[in-house]
Amino acid sequence: MDWRQFVMDLDTLNPDSVEEIFARHGAQSITFADAGDEPVLEPGPGETPLWSDTRVIGLFEPDADLDALRDSLKSAFNLDALPVHAVSDLEDRAWEREWLRDFGPMKFGHRLWILPGTSQADDAEAIGVRLDPGLAFGTGTHATTALCLEWLDGVDLEGKTMLDFGCGSGVLAIAALKLGCARAVATDIDRQAIAATRENARNNDVLERLDTVEEATDIDRQFDVVIANILAAPLIELAETIARHVGNGCSLVLSGILSEQVEQVLEAYKPYIEFDAPVEREQGGQTWVRLNGRRTGD
């Protein structure tokens, strides 16, 4: 089967929102690439920079409605016209793996590495997560995921249980298991995300310690650690549901939050969680925030 490729300059558009819209319209692969000639030198631990001139590339099936994609992008960003973009036809290839050409090993914290493809970490103490997200999303390249990975690397997970709420590629659950978690549950409303999570867990030899659940309402237990890396609106809407899965005195980590949304999220979780100071990360012209804290009451 041949494919259609939609290429657009990102300009000032929020990459996380663009990625979400592409995915909603059926993108089988989403890649961010340099639109200019700007090298990104080796970042510091946990840093995940994009180029100042970035291009987004989406791969779609032949019958995808790209006019609807254009309309959604214009509506979401209140634009009369999109940034420079083009559509082209491509011969069939393993496009869901094309992103592997653009990323190398990435370090988060002191010892946690994300290793695309067959890449290796030049670190004798490395704990590596081998990741091929396929049709799901969450590689560590976005600040929201990076903030969660750094938190996981910095806490003692030995023997604990963990819930990855909105798992995407499963990278957070898998990282937790590699860092010592006894068992993890990963849930997502997207079946492709569940499939990708199971495949990635199998590739990291942790599948026997991971349970996947499509309906979060089917989860009826509490965990030592709960991480929800989604968006502010569902975090607020699902605050009671998410918080009730956190054991008393146990940890909750929330990500996918813009700085201007922090107060609303804090208010939604105020009855349940005592949060530490927010942790911020700049990326793509936006300030992203991680909130982490502990459950304090019933």
Image (cartoon, helix red, strand yellow):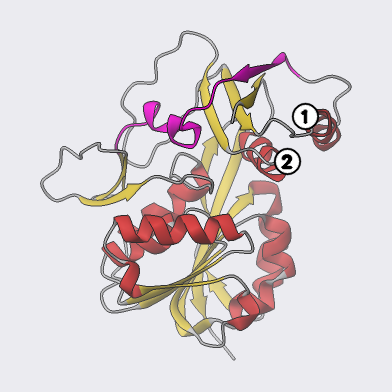
Does residue 9 appear anywhere in the picture? no
Between 138 and 248, the one lying in front of the other is 138
For image coordinates 59% across by 25% down, the residue present is 57
Residue at screen point 34% across, 67% down: 207
Q: Secondary structure at mark 2?
A: loop
- x, y percent for residue 43: 34, 30
Q: Quadrant of residue 122?
A: top left
- Which residue position holds label 2? 25
Which amino acid lies under the numbered mark 1 shown in the image of this protein?
Answer: Leu
Q: In this view of the protein, which residue sits in the foreground, 213 or 224?
A: 213
The mark nearer the N terminus, 2 or 1, is 2
Work out which residue is located at the far front of the displayed protein and give it: 1
Q: Is residue 56 magenta?
A: no
- In the rendered structure, the answer to whether residue 149 lies left or right of residue 109 reads right
Residue 44 is situated, as x and y percent measured from the top left of the image, at 32, 34
Which quadrant is the C terminus positioned in?
A: bottom right
Up the image or down, 225 lies above or below 63; here it is: below
Q: Which residues are magenta?
A: 83-105
Tell me the number on the disc at residue 57. none
- Residue furthest right in the image: 80
Q: Residue furthest left?
A: 124
Which one is in front, 23 or 286? 23
**225 vs 229: above or below:** below
Q: Is residue 62 left or right of residue 76?
A: left
Residue 257 in view in this figure = yes
Residue 289: give x, y in percent of width and height: 56, 50
Q: Is 94 inside the magenta-drawn segment?
A: yes
Q: Nearer the viewer, residue 79 or 66?
A: 66
Quadrant of the rendered structure where residue 180 is?
A: bottom left
Tell me residue 201's x, y (percent). Answer: 36, 60
Mark 1 — residue?
A: 66
Q: Quadrant of residue 270?
A: bottom right
